Structure formats: structure tokens, C-alpha cells
Image: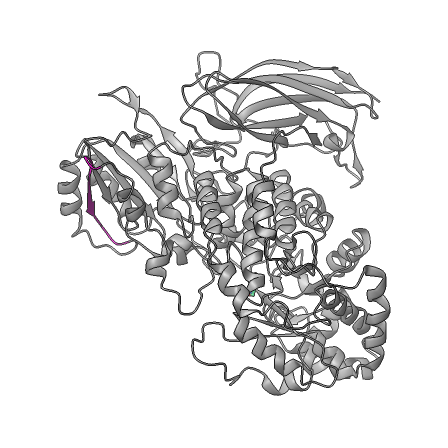
Amino acid sequence: MQNTCPSIRRRALAGLLLASVVPGVRAAGSDIEPRVEALLQQMTQEEKIGQLTQYSGNWNATGPVTFKGSHQDHLLAGRVGAMLNVLGAERTRAYQALAMQSRLKIPLLFGQDVIHGYQTTFPIPLAEAASWDLPAIEQSARIAATEAAASGIHWTFAPMVDIARDPRWGRVMEGAGEDPYLGSKIAFARVKGFQGRQLGDTDAVMATAKHFAAYGAAQGGRDYNSVDTSERLLREVYLPPFKAAVDAGVATFMNAFNDLNGIPANGSALLQRDILKGAWAFKGFVVSDWGSIGEMVAHGYVKDQRDAARAAITAGSDMDMESTAYRDHLGALVRDGQVAQSLVDDAVKRVLRKKFELGLFEDPYRFSDAAREQAVLARPEHRQAARAMAAKSIVLLKNEPWPATKQPLLPLQPQGKTIAFIGPLVKAVEDNHGAWAIRIPGLDYSKFIVTQWDGLKQRLPADARLLYAKGSDIQGDRRDGFAEAVAVARQADVVVMSLGESADMSGEAKSRADLGLPGVQDELVQAVHATGKPVVLLVNAGRPLTFNWAAERVNAIAYTWWLGTEAGNAIADVLLGEHNPSARLPISFPRSVGQIPVFYSHFNTGRPVPPPDASGAAGSQAFRSHYIDSPNAPRYAFGHGLSYTQFAYSDLRLDKTRLALTDTLTVRFTLRNTGARAGDEVVQLYLRDRVGSVVRPVQELKGFQKLHLQPGQSRELSFVIDRETLSFHNHRLQWVAEPGEFDLMVGAASDDIRLRASFELLE
Ligand code: NOJ
């Protein structure tokens, strides 16, 4: 759908970032093809297979580059197409120099997991998604690309665009949450951000849409696990963000560890040939995940590595990351007539095209410039952007009035006050970076990262006191710090507690069966709360956690995820009211693991729980789709997030209530900031198709706008609904809009609908 979102605020920064870009030297598209063909003609089979082979270097090494165990012979012989985990201008240059001694001097690609920043670390992707701020998300990826590209990297293995509805899965931190509409918008923004104006500029890196496909639906939330979905769910929920990445021009795809309906993603011709390279006409290349071609043996899909190589190349996997199946078997498979030469040649050409587009044949070292690296990594404006992004990512979940003052606890009023800052994450350093952060060799992170303690301490007025107690470890059962925490709380006017996971509790292979605050932290909140002091809780985590006791009793809760290098400053900005919180949850927060999966766009079922009556009383739930020991509703719903101001929605108008398939419908309404502070609202538009040839969700996000209003200011907003907005995969899996009644909901969250209307789509 079109949405008439106002201001796009990216121009100033774009100008700044372009300052040191060497413009693209790549050949124009029409020149590339003949060069690719000519080069292919000169290549031996071994050299071709080399282009489809990717090895890992040792990026943590801090000594001189020795190439010990680093595939030197293969590089010299032209048997490597790409490396990952080789970091820095000097190191990438040294590796490239080896490739330049090979017969055809085909440059290497350097890939890296640049997931949420390079040296300057931004919030984890799930946190950024909570900003619902597409220009800011694009800018974050732009800065990550600018830094990475200055450090010799050509290619990031990001964005992860997997829709995830199971917070047990540790990689939920790496995506954009549960919703395909929001996820698609964010996927588009991230690809644009990473790839910049064009590939070939020295501040642009190739992006990778991963993991193709449905990796986020792993059974039981266990990483690498099987996925079983209907084709409709695949097409409606899991594929749209990948399609959005293709629409944004993404250069590469990464397939996935999981099997999808019994076929490992690496061996899936449906995904890679029919959908990606067929229906979507994707011209880039597909890289496997780490060793995943070989893992098809363990899946029980192929009998050995040779068979794995056959299955993967046949299904459309172009480059083998670290399994060596292509290196060891592809040549023989072609010789023996089991794999067509044309499949190998097509994969090689896809890789070579990208190397031409990056300008590497003109200058294989153009990204490996130590002087540029030094200048770019130190840019203060990158830190400023990281701080702004971090503040925009903090979700204010709760902010109730404190009985004594009748004022919400936040923002803090620190003048003349004593604040106790308690918890195992108050003085943590590297945890603030969260999982999947780059570790630059030699950088002193204790000086680089702004801790939560330092961030707040530096900003308090001279007459305020800040006290500290750690209280407990993140994990483990030691309670010997409780007494000090309670004593410190007693001296304070207000307590801020910083609790949660350690950074390494989420990310790859970090599934959890219990989503509670780890260790004895729940008990620590209870002990501190028992002092009777007002408590503000900061929850740091890579996923939604369950913290029911605190959610019911603590007056103010802010979800801080992992915010990156500027975490401490951003948290202080929000606590002290210099940034008015504007983030909204991109994923539902369950009350318990037993509720999973819990997401807003579910079906109604034949026995829905009746809505509360006018008095708010719940109807009978007997023989309804419900739990006898828990509400169905999540603890915090998709789209939820508070502000220090309030917004009123009014005057909903539809320019028609009956529309033909070729019509558009314009929805208008008024938004007013009724509070005393300027603030951002994220206005959300949901639809429900009442009757369909297959049942439709009770709500589907179809549009949103984030906008800033001064106190008292109103703005008229509009959304335009067209046929595409109303379409879905019908009972025959055709993409159609079916005539009938639709409910339209506009609100501040999926569970906070302020305006309702209905309209009819005519035959
Ligand atoms: C495995 C992960 O699944 C993938 O996302 C990542 O890009 C590769 N390892 C390379 O580090």
C-alpha cells in the first residue's frame, strides 16, 4: 500500500557520509557481461570451482598475518573465490595480494557478519526494528557499510530478514520481529543502507538476504531445527521480506541450515530456482550457510559429501561456505555427467558479475586503504547516529504514577535527589554491544563503549547523588549481594535497576527453554521493591523475556535490548527525558513460554474467547480456545510502546465505503499531541478481511507512519488502500483481493485501536 508518510530526515547525514567516497569505477552493466564471458572462457574447471569456494580466515588474530592454516596454497592457485573473517585494510590487502599471484588474478571477495555496525556498534537489529523508523534504520546500515568498506570488507552477511515468532530462538535478536509487513519495510531499508547509491562505491558493501527460507520458524525455537509450514504461510509470512530485499536490489542471498517441509534449504530447488531465480528473477548469487551443504548428509537428505555437492548446485546454491563439498566433488560430478557444466558456469558468472560491479578488476585493493580506514572508523558523527538510534530503540513498556507524587516515575527529576543504580548490567561494558558485534583487534572497549553507569553519572546535575550496587550476577544463584543492594536502595529517592541477559545468551545457537530473568535477578527485584522505594526497571536482552512479577508491581519499565557503543548515553537520554521514547514492540512479549507462539495476526478460530462486555467483565471461557491458567493475550502486544506525552486520534473519514477493484480508498484522520511534551507517535493501520476463501487473521498491519508533534499540535494523516493492500493467497494460492467486507483499525498498538470503520470491496 502507499502511505503518505511526511518528512524523510536523511539528507544531512547522506552528505556527510559521501565525503570520502570513491565513486564507482565499475563497468556499466552492458560492459560487464562480455567481460564475464571472456574470463569464463579462460578458466579451468578448478579455477571455476575456486570461485564457488569460500573459506574462513582467523579474524581475531592480533599478530602479523602469517597465513598459517589460512589456505595460502589455494589462494595462490586461484582456488578461492571469497574469504570471511579476514578483517581490516592491512589484512584484506595481504590476502588479496596472494590472489593476485594466481594465474588469472581474479580478486577475492571479503565477506563478514556486519550485523549491527562495524566499529561503531548500533543497537541489535530487533531493537532497531522497535524504532519503526525506516530512515534511521537505513542510516544505521549505511554507517555500518561505510566503516566496513573502509576496512576492506566487500560484503556483509546481513540483513537477516527471517520472521520470528518464537523468542526461545536466540536469533530473534538479529531480525525485525514477527510481522511480514514491518519486516519487509525494514528489509528494504537495510539493503538500501548497506548497498548505498551503487555497488562499486567505496562506501557500499553487498548485502545478503538471509536465511532463505523460514529459518526463524525452527521447531521448539531450537536453532538449526526443522521447519514445517504450509505453502500459504511460507508465501504470506516468511517470504515477503526476502522479496522486499530483491526489490531493493540485494546482491546476494544466503540459504539456511534448516530443512523446509523435509527438504534442506541448500537442496531446495523450489526456493532457489523456482522462486528466487525464477519468479523473482534474482540476478545475484546464493551463498550457503557455514558448512550447510555438507550438513545435508546429517539431515539424511543425501548419502555423502559428493551427493551433497550435486544436490546443492542442482538446486541453485552458488557458493559453498566452508563445507568443501564443491571443492572436493564438483569437478568429478561434471566429469561423470551428474552435474551439467552449465550449472557450474552459471554460478561462476553470478559471482564474477559482482566482482566486476564492485570494481575489483579495476583495482582489487580499492577497499583496503589503511588511511581511509583510520579516518572513517573514527568519525564522531557515526557515534552521534548510534546514540540517536539507540535512544529511538528503547521501548517504554510501563510508566505509572508514583502514588506519593501522582506523577509517572519517568522521566526522572534528579535535582537534589539520590538515585540508586542497581544490577549486574549497570557497569557491564561489552554486553552493551549484544551478540554479533565485531571485535576490532587492538581496540580498548573499556574506553570505547559508554557504560550505563557512565552515561547516567555524567549527566546528573551536581546536586544529585548516584549510588551503586551490583546486587547479583547475571546467572548463578549467589544472593550475597542482595543486602548491599537493599541498603543502597534504602538511601535513595528512586531506584533504577538494570537487569537481563548477558549478550552471549542470545544470537546463534543460543536458544532458551526458560525466558525468565536469568539467575536470581527476579528475587533481586523483589528484595529491592520491598524497600518501598520507587523502582524503574531497565531490561537488557536480545529477545523478549518474561518478568511477570516485575511487570505487575514495578512502576516503570523500559526495554533496552542491547543498544551498542552509545548504550549508556542513550539510556540517560531517555531516563532524563532528553529523548521522549518513541519505540514500539516489533514482536509480542509472552507471559510464559507456554503461550508461544503468541503473535497478533492470528486467526479467530471457531471458538474465540468472547471480548469483555461494556463493563470490562470477561465472558465465559468454557470450551473456548484459551488456557485455564493464563490469559491468551501477550504481556505486551505487538506495536505497544509508551511516550512521555499522549496522543489523541479523531475524525476518521473514508473517502468511500464501497470500492471497486480498480479504486483506491483514502483514509484520513487527525492526530493531536495532547500532552505537555513534544513526541513521536507511530500510527498503525490494521485491516481484517472478514470472510475469505481461506480464513484471514484478526488483524494485519498494512501501514504505519512515525511522526513528530509539538505539544498541542495536530496533523491530518492519510493512508491509501488499494487492491494490492487487500490481496492475499487464496485457497488456490493465487494472489487476489476477494470482494467482501473489511474492518479497518487505526491505533497506537495492535491492542490499542483508537478508530474503527469498515468498507466493502465490490465484485
Ligand atoms: C552461520 C550463520 O548462520 C550465518 O548467519 C553467518 O553469516 C555465517 N555463520 C557466517 O558467520
Q: Is residue 661 visible?
A: yes
Point out the quarter of the image occupied by ligand 1.
Answer: bottom right
> Residue 730 location, x and y as percent?
77, 36
Q: Is residue 466 magenta?
A: yes
Residue ID at (59%, 22%):
746
Q: Is residue 751 left or right of residue 555?
A: right
Picture layout, residue 429 above or below residue 299? above
> Residue 168 location, x and y as percent?
47, 50
Name the residue nearer the viewer: 435 or 316. Answer: 435
Q: Is residue 240 left or right of residue 711?
A: right
Task: Tell me which segment is drawn in magenta.
Answer: 462-473
Q: Is residue 690 visible?
A: no
Q: How many marks?
A: 0
Q: Is residue 293 left or right of residue 657?
A: left
Q: Is residue 400 left or right of residue 360?
A: left
Name the residue nearer the viewer: 557 or 713. Answer: 713
Residue ID at (73%, 15%):
655
Residue ID at (20%, 46%):
468
- Colouring scheme applied when the structure was drawn: one colour
For the N terminus, give its image quadrant. top right
Picture layout, residue 401 above or below residue 26? above
Q: Is residue 486 magenta?
A: no
> Residue 548 location, x and y as percent?
35, 37
> Residue 34 location, x and y as percent?
86, 69
Name the residue nearer the viewer: 210 or 152. Answer: 152
For the C terminus, give its image quadrant. top right
Where, by quadrant of the figure, is residue 199 drawn? bottom right
